[in-house]
């Protein structure tokens, strides 16, 4: 087993996840309720069998994590659970406000103990090796050498694409690489217009943007305007715990109405509780010069999660034989148009394990081709001027962000198409330059998102069109797929 990661730093969206893992663990909760909440959030586009599997396999995943030594918070000996938006029960398990970090630490420790595992860090995957309609491995740049690495099966676990947008909660690795590679290999890509914007990201002037977990609102935090007025119930009956898309758009409206920022406030909660339950968030606010326990802190929305991705079946198989996908890069059908809070780590656990089982079966029959290595000649010179990643991220944020319309999307599609042409002319995949590789992913996936958003003339879940503000089930209760056909 060869485990490739493009970065040597231990950074990933999973590791950064704060809130928790949703699972039915309490007698007053039920599978039916977790399923209903997930389907409701997904706004008519979840695949019910995938949701059923996700929810029913969740408690066993939690049990396995406990066996692996993961330290969930407890109260009086029982696993503690919190509430997050659009959940009808307290079912989110957590490890303070660094649940993802605790999860990745536990799994990584276990994985690295396995014999026969080769881990290459700083290895840049450039493209998938497709021959005879099957994935045979991939091309990797590592230590200045370009290698075609043969594999009986490949799984993409590359995360999502928060960094396609100027404002995001994601680490910089989340630049859509896996989706771009799969699309280049002819795999079916689905539902890309559905991007989730998290409503509460710390936005203090001059400070780094930092997620302020929805679990804060689950524990009683309130959104207030500059006058201290808790405004959410004026926009949504569910108030501060309405679904993320609704809260994010309510914030935009309140900022437009007042011309001033909005704030998240926990000053009415016990400071000792806030410090012990949310130590990472308290520290991040302190770094920005703010005391979360004593003052309301400024927040605004940022890109958080891509619901669409590489279409898979319930065992992580993509439409290309030999190629699998798991986690945010995949579109398993569990999230539909909008992901329910804390279903993402859960999806990675449930469908990641299933993909691994399916791959173990697949490699028994696949033939292993010969790998090939050649020295990397360095970049090809003379290409058209390329945009910077920030140019692209600004266009995505302004025209393909929280509020979209035909005029803005059309301009974005035109611009992204021109940039995509310039990148093709530059033969970037021969460059092996991490910056250009990243730009290629951002432009490729950005264009697919913008096109899908232009095509879907309605509003649903994470996709909001100001020129088509209503949900239109008669025309649009269906998925939009994007596929290219390549050979060789
Ligand atoms: C959060 O802690 O608010 C994020 C959790 C999630 O994305 O489900």
Image (cartoon, rainbow, N blue to C red):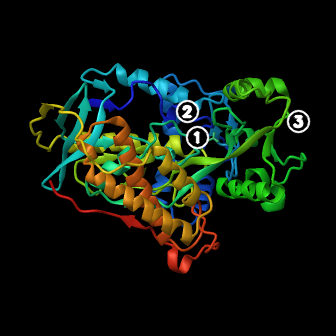
Is the CB atom of the residue marked by disc 3 within 8 angstroms of ligand 1's nearest atom?
no
The x, y position of residue 84, in whole percent, is 68, 45
Cα distance between the residues tagged 3 and 2: 27 Å
User: Which one is earlier in the sequence, the residue at label 1 or at label 2?
Assistant: 2
The x, y position of residue 33, in whole percent, is 63, 54
User: Which one is earlier in the sequence, the residue at label 3 or at label 2?
Assistant: 2
Cα distance between the residues tagged 1 and 3: 26 Å
Q: Which residue is mark 1?
A: 169
Is the CB atom of the residue marked by disc 1 within 8 angstroms of ligand 1's nearest atom?
yes
Q: Which residue is mark 3?
A: 268
The x, y position of residue 306, in whole percent, is 50, 51
Q: Is residue 51 above or below residue 452?
A: above
Binning the other alpha carbons within 10 Å of mark 1 as few (below 14), some (14 to 19) or many (20 upward) gives many
Binning the other alpha carbons within 10 Å of mark 3 as few (below 14), some (14 to 19) or many (20 upward) gives few
Name the residue at 24% across, 23% down.
116
Whether residue 221 appears in this view of the structure is no
Task: Kindly indicate whether the residue at mark 2 contacts the one at mark 3 (C-beta within 8 angstroms).
Answer: no
Q: Which residue is mark 2?
A: 16
Element marked by disc 1: loop
Choose top left, top right, bottom left or bottom right for residue 245.
bottom right
Which residue occupies the extreme bottom position in the image?
474
Name the residue at 37% across, 54% down.
444
| Left or right of 428 on screen, residue 241 | right
**Camera-side residue of 368 and 205:** 205
């Amino acid at each position: 087993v060869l485990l490739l990661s493009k970065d040597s730093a231990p950074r990933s969206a999973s590791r950064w996840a704060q809130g928790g893992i949703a699972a039915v663990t309490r007698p007053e909760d039920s599978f039916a309720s977790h399923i209903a909440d997930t389907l409701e959030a997904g706004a008519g586009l979840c695949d019910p069998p995938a949701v059923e599997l996700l929810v029913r396999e969740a408690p066993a995943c939690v049990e396995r994590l406990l066996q692996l030594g993961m330290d969930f918070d407890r109260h009086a000996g029982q696993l503690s659970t919190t509430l997050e938006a659009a959940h009808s029960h307290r079912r989110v398990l957590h490890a303070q406000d660094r649940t993802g970090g605790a999860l990745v630490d536990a799994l990584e420790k276990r994985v690295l103990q396995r014999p026969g595992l080769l881990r290459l860090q700083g290895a840049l995957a450039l493209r998938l090796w497709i021959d005879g309609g099957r994935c045979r491995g991939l091309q990797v740049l590592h230590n200045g050498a370009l290698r075609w690495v043969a594999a009986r099966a490949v799984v993409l676990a590359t995360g999502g694409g928060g960094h396609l947008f100027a404002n995001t909660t994601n680490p910089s690795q989340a630049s859509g690489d896996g989706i771009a590679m799969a699309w280049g290999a002819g795999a079916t890509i689905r539902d890309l217009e559905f991007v989730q914007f998290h409503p509460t990201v710390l936005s203090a002037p001059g400070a780094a943007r930092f997620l302020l977990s929805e679990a804060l609102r689950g524990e009683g935090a309130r959104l207030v305007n500059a006058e201290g007025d808790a405004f959410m119930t004026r926009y949504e009956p569910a108030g501060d715990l309405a679904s993320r898309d609704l809260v994010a758009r309510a914030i935009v409206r309140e900022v437009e109405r007042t011309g001033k920022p909005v704030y998240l406030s926990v000053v009415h909660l016990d400071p000792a509780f806030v410090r012990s339950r949310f130590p990472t968030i308290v520290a991040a606010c302190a770094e920005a010069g703010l005391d979360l326990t004593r003052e309301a802190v400024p927040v605004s929305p940022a890109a958080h999660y891509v619901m669409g991705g590489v279409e898979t079946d319930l065992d992580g198989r993509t439409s290309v034989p030999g190629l699998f996908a798991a986690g945010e890069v995949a579109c398993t059908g569990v999230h539909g148009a909008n992901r329910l809070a804390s279903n993402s780590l859960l999806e990675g656990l449930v469908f990641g394990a299933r993909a691994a089982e399916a791959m173990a079966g697949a490699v028994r029959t696949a033939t292993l081709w010969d790998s090939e290595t050649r020295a990397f000649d360095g970049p090809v010179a003379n290409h058209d001027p390329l945009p910077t990643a920030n140019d692209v991220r600004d266009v995505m944020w302004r025209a393909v962000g929280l509020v979209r319309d035909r005029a803005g999307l059309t301009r974005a599609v035109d611009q992204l198409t021109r940039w995509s042409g310039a990148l093709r002319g530059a033969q970037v995949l021969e460059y092996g330059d991490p910056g250009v590789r990243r730009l290629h992913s951002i432009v490729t996936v950005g264009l697919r998102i913008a096109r899908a958003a232009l095509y879907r003339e309605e509003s649903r879940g994470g996709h909001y069109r100001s020129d088509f503000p209503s949900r239109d089930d008669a025309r649009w209760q269906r998925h939009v797929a994007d596929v290219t056909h390549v050979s060789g």
